[in-house]
Amino acid sequence: MTAFLDTSTPKIGLGCWAIGGPFTAGGRAVGWGVVDDAQSTRAIHAAVDMGVRLFDSAQAYGAGHSETVLGHALKNRPDVALVTKFGWAIDTQAKTLGDMITDPATIRATLDASRTRFQREHIDLVLMHPNDMDIALAAPIFDELDKMQAEGAIGGYGWSTDFPDRLNAFADRPAFTATEHAMNVFFRAEHMVTAIEATQITGLVRSPLAMGILGGKYGAGAQFKSDDVRGTDEGWMAYFKDGKIKDKHLQQLDGVRDILSSNGRSLAQGALAWLWARSPNALPIPGFRTTAQVTDLCGAMDHGPLTQSQMADIEAILDRPPEGPPMAR
């Protein structure tokens, strides 16, 4: 496992979906609205100054724009690890996503394009993006990634998936060093945590703030616009309906708010502290837009994980039902 993925002490990376700007899939918005690239760049630089050494992007985010912004901001910082995800066709001009890509040679070509956007010869970690791609289709792609790793084009690889069987199918490969999966105070990710801890790879945690809900900024009246993915009722999103946060999640948040914000933490810092206490393999990658958000997120490292007593209190309050079978999240 490469050093930048060491989670022996609380660390965060930053997720770069929100700084990708507008893009669509099937005519529906799947970005987070209009962005200011100068603001994004200032936030990236502030994060590095505060100790962040991993940024997680994807070819899909802004149809290449997120990678371009990161490449410009970090072109003189080879010590900062860049992660990207692949597997969806993109149109960088029209800002649209197309079909899933399964051809290994095409995957290689898209990763070469990512290296160009990153302004780097080497990408530290690349992840399969289609959550539930068939394992048989994925195998030759990972064979190609083994070749790219041997050539020095990538440092390691993994899969962004919520299905343990996808992880387990390839976790014995030496270059398979990480997976990326959904987990937060609302969702314990029992299946994925069990598989990750058994294989002792790193779990990059997406949606660590439940797409912003656990930051505490939004209340019952919040209405997300149609150019924001949270306002589009995508079927895989568990937290929103008709562009609003579901009542049950607002109620859950109210129930655990005091615990998460105890000991001088902000609400977002408490949500990250929950993740560190949940699993030693967890490396949260919360999204960001501004320097103020980055400052708050990075401040979580000063507090560390919640105590086991606090974790038990949260579980008693939330009274969770069984997780059920794995599904894309």
Image (cartoon, helix red, strand yellow):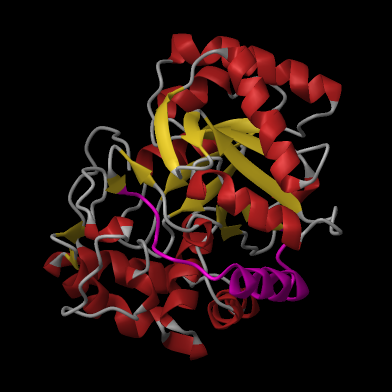
* Residue 322 percent coordinates (x, y): 20, 45
Q: Quadrant of the C terminus?
A: top left
Q: Is residue 9 above or below residue 98?
A: below
Left or right of 181 on screen, residue 147: right
**Is 290 situated left or right of 217 in this image?**
right
Point 74% across, 58% down: residue = 72
Q: Quadrant of residue 131?
A: top left
Residue 201 located left or right of residue 221: right
Q: Residue 91: x, y in percent?
A: 49, 36
Residue 287, horizontal then vertical, whole percent: 50, 63
Residue at screen point 45% across, 42% down: 94
Quadrant location of the N terminus in the rendered image: top right
User: Residue shown at 58%/10% (left/top)?
Assistant: 140
Residue 96: in sight, yes or no?
Answer: yes
Residue bounds of the magenta highlight = 29-53
User: Looking at the image, can residue 124 be seen?
Assistant: no
Q: Residue at x 62, y 28 (%)?
A: 110
Q: Tell me where residue 181 sits by quadrant.
A: top left
Above/below status of 266 relative to 15: below
Mark count: 0
Horizontal arrangement in the rendering, residue 86 relative to residue 77 (left or right): left
Above or below 305: residue 291: below
Q: Residue 231 sits in which quadrant?
A: bottom left
Name the foreground residue: 117 vs 8: 117
Queried whether the magenta region covers residue 168, the answer comes back as: no
Q: Residue furthest front?
A: 93
Q: Is residue 37 magenta?
A: yes
Q: Position of residue 102 (x, y in %)?
A: 49, 16
Which residue is more in the foreground, 307 or 110? 110
